Every structure is written in structure tokens, then in C-alpha cells.
Amino acid sequence: MKEILQTKRSGPLVIGHRGAGGYAPENTMVAFERGLSLRADAIELDINVSKDGELIVIHDPTLDRTTSGSGLVCQHTTAEIQALDAGSWFDPSFSACRVPTLREVLRWARGRTRVVIEIKNGPVFYPNIERLLLTQLDELDMRQEVLVISFDHIVLRDFKALAPDVATGVLYASRLPDPTVMAKSVNAEVLMPYWALLTREEVEQAHAADLLISPWGGPEQNYEHIIALGVDAVGADYPDRPRDVMERAQQ
């Protein structure tokens, strides 16, 4: 399962955060395409659930920030959500962008790139979101092409019970006495701490426990620092930035 964070390139795997959320409207097909064009090894996205039970690729539980709509995702049908403009908030030139479903993105990604799927749960909680996700992975035979992550470690535990062969990662934003114990308690393979709180000791502790480590953060990340710690992967709104850091280090 750890093959999901392996790459033929030197250095850690680069995960395009929400595609390439610094260059295009996050969680849209344009952003995912841009991420690959900037040599991301995988793309990351977020899922919420629509009123009609579809997994929707959007970060927030509400539509307000990244679309022309408003209100909760779970109170709108897929058709209503996909009729919205999901790009003009970023720049008017992206007005044609729409909110994709997870099924659409998985079909696009299958055999092309790996996908890191963040289950969003809370403050809106979605009953059976883990079962909805597994059903779609099985429809496309993609269990081995994804990493499932969440800040909700309970839903991650429940997903792992359904699909022990799918790689999972625990997101967290604090310094923990023993993060490896936390990960092992839900059978996760990957630790995903906030980058600014990461230490070399935590990286070494993860590797000693046979876990991988992939910090997260926004454009404020210091990639020279992160990569020097020996991480296995790094997320990036601008996937070319960590790639450039690694290439300069090889010169």
C-alpha cells in the first residue's frame, strides 16, 4: 500500500494540493490538469456529499466561497451544484469551470495519476460517506491508486475496516506525544502533520514505526526546510515550487 507515495523521481513525491490551487480554481478539472502539467506525482482533492448522495469535489461544506451559489452542499442536488460557476471567484477567465463529482475525477485520473482523497466530515457529518467512497473506488477498480485521508480519524478508522487494502493517512495540526500510536490506532500508513510543527525527530519516529510522513500546508510552506527533514511526500498549491527546490539541490 505504501507504493502510493513512491515515485521514480528523486526526492519526495509532490502532491498537487486541490490540483494546483495556487494557479487555478481549486478542486476543478482545470486545476487537476495544471497540477499534472507542473509534474505533480499525484493530485489531492476534497469530498463532501450532495443532497442526492453524490460525492462532490469541493473543500468546504458550503458553496459560498468557491462557487456562485450559497448554502450547504448537502442541501443541493448534483445538478444544481454543477450548474454553478466555480471559477470566477478565482479569476473571471475561469468562469466556465464547474464543480466536478468524484466519479468524474476518478475516471479522468485512472491509469494517469494517483489521487489523494480527503474525506470532509464536520461540522457537517455525512452518514456512510466511507461506504459511498469505497463503492466508487470499486466501480473503477482504483483501490490501489488512491490515498484516503482525513482530520476525522473516526471516519478513517471506519473506512479502513471496510477496505484494509486501501492506503490511509491521518491529518493533524498539533504536536502529539506519540503520533505513531495515533496512526496505528486507526491502521493508517501515513502521518500528515501541519508542516510548521514538523521536526526531524517526528520524521525519524514515523520511519522507525514503518510509517510514511507527508506534511501539509498552504503557499507559506518552506520547501527547503521540509524536504531536508527527509519526508516522503509534500503537498503544494504550486507543485512546481517543491520540484524546483529538489532540482536545484541536485545541481
Image (cartoon, helix red, strand yellow):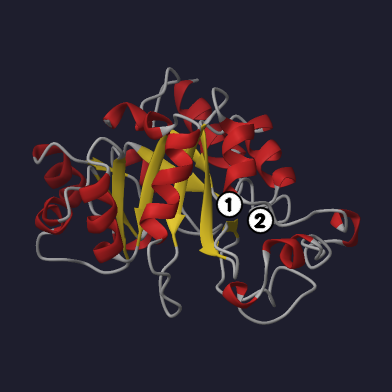
Residue 178 lies, with reference to residue 67, above or below; the image says: above
Q: Amino acid at mark 1?
A: Arg
Q: Label 2: state its secondary structure.
A: loop
Residue 76 lies, with reference to residue 141, above or below; the image says: below
Q: Quick check: marks 1 and 2 in contact, CB under 8 Å?
A: yes
Q: Residues within 10 Å of mark 1 (few under 14, many from 20)?
A: many
Is residue 133 visible in the rendered image? The answer is yes
Q: Amino acid at mark 2?
A: Glu
Residue 3 lies, with reference to residue 213, above or below; the image says: above
Residue under label 2, please give it: 26
The spot of residue 44 in percent (x, y) is 51, 47
| Residue 119: quarter of image | bottom left
The spot of residue 231 in percent (x, y) is 31, 40
- Sequence-earlier tag: 1 or 2: 1
- Which residue shows up at 72% across the image and 80% down it? 70
| Residue 122: quarter of image | bottom left
- 90 with respect to 46 (left or right): right
| Residue 228: quarter of image | top left
Q: Label 1: state its secondary structure.
A: loop
- Which residue shows up at 41% across the image and 60% down it? 129
- 111 with respect to 182 (left or right): right
Farthest front residue in view: 52
Res 18 label: 1
Measure the C-alpha gap from mark 1 to mark 2: 5 Å
The spot of residue 18 in percent (x, y) is 58, 51
Q: Nearer the viewer, residue 183 or 235?
A: 183
- Which residue shows up at 72% across the image and 65% down it? 81
Image quarter where the N terminus lies is top left
Is residue 224 visible in the rendered image? The answer is no
Residue 34 lies, with reference to residue 162, above or below; the image says: above
Res 90 label: none
